[in-house]
Amino acid sequence: MAASLALHPDRLLPAEPGTRAIARRLYSEVRRLPIVSPHGHTDPAWFAGNEPFADPAQLLITPDHYLLRMLYSQGIALERLGVARSDGTPREADSRSVWRLFAANYHLFRGTPSRLWLDWVFAAVFGLDVRLQAETADHYFDAISGKLAEAAFRPRALFEQFGIEVLATTESPLDDLRHHEETRRSGWPGRLITTFRPDPVLDPEFEGFRGNLARLSDITGCDAFGYQGYLDALRARRRYFAAMGATATDHGHPTAATASLGDREARALFRRVVAGAITARDAELFRAHMLTVMAGMSLEDGLVMQLHPGSHRNHNAELFARFGRDKGADMPQRTDYVGGLKPLLDRHGNDSRLTLIVFTLDESTYARELAPLAGHYPALKLGPAWWFHDSPEGMRRFRRQVTETAGFYNTVGFNDDTRAFCSIPARHDVARRVDCGYLAELVAEHQLDEDEALEIAIDLAYRLCKRAYRL
C-alpha cells in the first residue's frame, strides 16, 4: 500500500514550541502575499502561446537541472530522462517511461530541497495524496496528465493561480523577444517581463562569440566589431529590453573581477578580443572591464545590475559536448569580492542611483566579505541564498551570517531563479517559512518585538524585492 502524501502545516518552522508559535503567527500574515519573481529562467513561449504543457515528464523532469544532476550522479544516463543530445542521437521519447524511471528513483531526493518543492507541487497543485514511488508512477502520470489537459492548468491560468504579480524571464541580447511581444499583444493582464543577460556578447570565451558579435551587428545596425559600435549596440539592446519591460540586467561571469580601463587600453584589448588572439587572462580582463562599463550604462538607463559569479560552468566537459549547457554540471568555486569588486566600486559604489545586487555560491564570503561590503556601499545589495544554497539550511546560513553586519535592508528579499515553473510558489513558500522561523527566534530571544518581526517578514516576502528591482 502506497504511503500517504501530506504537507505538514508546520514544516520548516522551529521545533521549540514557543518559537514555533511565534513563527506560525508571522507566517500566517505572509503566506498569501503576491509572488514577485524578479529573476528566473522560465520559457516566455509558454505564456505567449498559452498551450497546454506536454506531459508530466517534459514539464517537471527534463528541464530541471537539479533533478538531472542527482540522477546522473547515480549512473542514470540523461538520454533515458528524455534529454536531447547535441548530435541528434536518439533519446527516450516515451515520457511515461521517463516518469517511471524518475519515480523509481525519487528516494534519491530525500532531504533535498527538490523533494520539498516537488512534494508541494504534487500535493498543492495537482492534488495528489500518495507518495511518489515506483508503484504509484502510473497513477501520478495519469493524474497529472489529466490536469494538464484542463484549461485551469495552462500556463497563464497557473500564473494567476500561483498568485504571481510579476515574473521576469532572462534572455540574451540576441533574442528578438517575440514571445514577450506576443504576450503583450494578447491583452492578457499577467505581468511578464524580460531581463537583459549579455554574457554571449560580453564573454570572449562564450561559445560562438564572434558569430554572436555578427548577429549583434545585424540586429542593431551598429558595427559591433569596432569598440564604439560595440558599445552603441549594447546600449541599443538595453533600450529595447527596457521597452519590453526589463528592469534589470544579469551577469553570470565566472568571477567577480572588475576593472576600469582607460579608453586606449580598452580599445586595444577589444581589438585582441575581436581578432581571437587572446589569453585566458585577456578574457578575464575584458569581462572585468565590461562589468564596470555595464554599471556605467545602468546609471544611464536605470536598469538594476545583478552579478551571479562563482560557478565553474559545464565542469563535465564530456557531458557539455554531448548535451550542451545547463544539464547539472556547474560547480561552485571560490570567489573574491573585496578585491574583485573594488575597481567597479571605486568608480560607482558611492552612487546611490546604481543598484548592484551580488549573489554568491561561495558561502565563506557571506560574513567575511559580502555583508561588510553591502553594509557600507550605497550601490551594493545582497541577493538571497542562490542555486546550491536555495534550500532551508542555505537560507538559514545566509540570514545568520549576513544580518548582524548588513541588516535586513541591504538584502533584496527572495527570488526563485528557476526553469521549473510549477516550483515557483513552492520555493517562495519555503523562503517565507524559513524567514519567519529566523525572525521568531529573534523575537523569542527578545532581540525584536513581534510587530517589528512582522514588518520585516512582509518586507522580505514582498516589499524589498519590489523596491530593489524597481517593480
Image: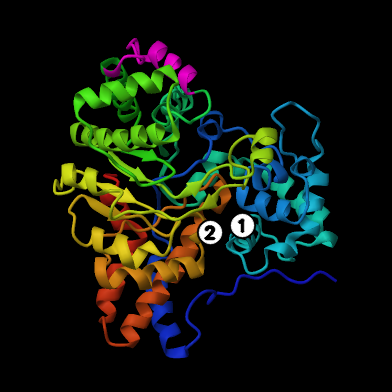
In the picture of the structure, the residue carrying the numbered disc 1 is 121
Residue depicted at x 31% and y 83%? 443
Quadrant of the rendering where the C terminus is positioned: top left
Q: Residue 443 versus residue 173: which sits nearer the camera? A: 173
Q: Magenta residues?
A: 209-227
Circles 2 and 1: CB atoms closer than 8 Å: yes
* In magenta segment, residue 292: no
Residue 125: tell me if it is visible.
Answer: yes
* Disc number placed over residue 17 in the picture, else none: none
Q: Position of residue 126 (x, y in %)?
A: 65, 55
Numbered disc 1: secondary structure: helix
Q: Sort mark 2 into few (<14), some (14-19) or many (20+) by Cα contacts within 10 Å.
A: many
Q: Sort mark 1 into few (<14), some (14-19) or many (20+) by Cα contacts within 10 Å.
A: some
Q: Amino acid at mark 1?
A: Val
Instruction: Find residue 7 and report its image quarter.
Output: bottom right
**Secondary structure that dominates the magenta span:** helix
Vertical placement of residue 210 versus 290, above or below: above
Along the polypeptide, which appears first: circle 2 or circle 1?
A: 1
* In magenta segment, residue 222: yes
Vertical placement of residue 187 versus 230, above or below: below
Q: Residue 103 versus residue 147: which sits nearer the camera? A: 103
Q: Position of residue 78 (x, y in %)?
A: 74, 43
Q: Residue 59 versus residue 290: which sits nearer the camera? A: 290
Quadrant of the rendering where the N terminus is positioned: bottom right
Report the side of 12 relative to 69 (left or right): left
Report the side of 94 relative to 469 (left or right): right
Q: Position of residue 431 (x, y in %)?
A: 45, 64
Q: Amino acid at mark 2?
A: Ala
Residue depicted at x 41% and y 45%? 39
In the picture of the structure, the residue carrying the numbered disc 2 is 426
Real-space CA distance between mark 2 and mark 1, rounded to the nearest whole angstrom: 7 Å
